[in-house]
Amino acid sequence: MSHEPTLPAGTTSVPPGDLLGTHRVLSPPGAMPQPAERLDADPSREFSTEILVDVETLNIDAASFRQMEEASGGDLKGVERLVLETIARRGKQHNPVTGSGGMLLGVVRRVGAQATDRGLAVGDRVATLASLSLTPLTVRRILAVRPASAQVDVEGTAILFHSAPVAKMPTDMPERLALALLDVAGAAPQVARLAQPGEAVAVLGAGGKSGLLCAAEARRRVGMEGRVIGVESFPAYAEELRALGICDAVVVADARDPLAVRDAVLPHTGGAGADLTLSCVNVGGVELSAIVATKDRGKVYYFAMSTSFTAAALGAEGIGRDVDLYIGNGYAHHHAAHTLDLVRGSEALRGLLASRYG
Ligand code: NAP
């Protein structure tokens, strides 16, 4: 079956562009937009399969924001400079060090004639669910950098390709909260697929945004017979997680320390290790910790963009661990609705997330 949109009469003067966005790639030739070095983000060039958005806020990926903060010695002006430099050079917010992007909040300004099937109208408030690492972006100026949520308020434009997932903003919660949740919307649905009733689930970085969602989803899935173990390095976040009452154990430990993680998780799993371990940290170097916390033939889900595929694969092989390693796909069918509903269903979780991001 063809997915090509049909062109309404009278719209032939506007070129269609490519559904996957390859018409916006400037270099290297033949690249897809995500791995491309540079995109054409010029909003005055019109393609009928595109949607043009006026951008209000960039929700920078946590691993990327942390890297830019560290590179700037904690100076937010430095983060601002790095964001502007990256967008000017690449036509997208694609952090060259972490390789990750984020997503954005904006208002639809133009819907191409061949993009009307996306169900959006001019004036709709939307969050893009495709990474900023492939979204053509211009930024005229930065209005504010908010480190607590890794969000940056801007004036600019973004182009959405026909294939890019996008969500209308919900009206029953603060937009900043919804944006933060939608940034990590792929996490909880994957837990729902991978965790089974009665199993033990360990979450590394469990006090952060995606970690809280994964822990809450794991609790729903494994039930009271199962175990949910949270590992978090920031004591205040660990305390807030404990207070939610969704974990059987919350341990303050550095997830980059494999032995500390193993010793934190194994006692709560009868010594065998977790059936499923999730990495939700915003730093590198936790690949082996997740592996040693997991039982033989268990599963490790690397949601963190700071994960090294090489370190995970060679690390597991090197210590003879037969575990299934999953790369965190940011997209799952209906992931936005799933994640928003998870939070709507728990007043305590919603309250905590709203206090941080709302
Ligand atoms: P977040 O809210 O910053 O949460 C990360 C948590 O990990 C924080 O609580 C952090 O504590 C904690 N942490 C940091 N270093 C740690 C360590 N050594 N040991 C234990 N805990 C540690 O981040 P997020 O928004 O949930 O994102 C988490 C990860 O998901 C990031 O790597 C991000 O790139 C990735 N992500 C993936 C996708 C995807 O599609 N796969 C989409 C979006 C995001 P502090 O607050 O003290 O730093």
Image (tube, grey):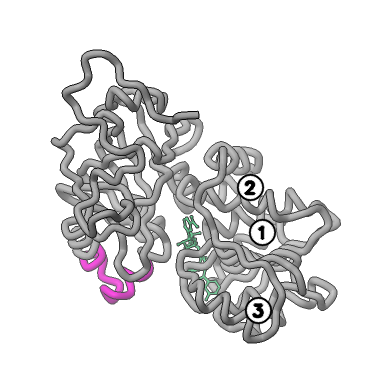
Q: Residue furthest top?
A: 9
Secondary structure of the residue carrying numbered label 3:
helix
User: Residue 292's x, y, as percent?
Assistant: 68, 79
Q: Is residue 272 magenta?
A: no
Question: Going 46% across and 42% down the picture, which residue do you hit?
Answer: 178
Residue holding disc 3: 261
Residue drawn 81% across and 75% down?
272
**Ligand 1 under 8 Å from disc 3 Cβ:** no
Residue under label 1, please give it: 243
Q: How would you rate the neighbour count of disc 3 (Cα within 10 Å): few for under 14, some for 14-19, many for 20 or more?
A: many
Asked if ligand 1 lies within 8 A of label 1, the reply is no
State left or right for residue 69 relative to residue 337. left
> N-terminal of the two: label 3 or label 2?
3
* 119 to 149, vertically: above or below: above
Residue 172 on image: x %, y %:
50, 31
Residue contact between numbered discs 2 and 1, judged by CB atoms under 8 Å? yes
Q: Which residue is mark 2?
A: 348
Label 1 environment density (alpha carbons within 10 Å; few <14, some 14–19, many ≥20):
some
Write the residue at 63% across / 79% down: 316
Distance from disc 1 to disc 3, alpha carbons, whole Å, reads 21 Å
- Classify 118 as above or below 217: above
Callout 1 amino acid: Ala
Q: Distance between the Cα atoms at labels 2 and 1?
A: 9 Å
Magenta region, main secondary structure: helix
Magenta region: 65-79
Lower sequence index among marks 1 and 3: 1
Figure quadrant of residue 9: top left
76 drawn magenta: yes
Hey, what amino acid is under mark 2? Ala
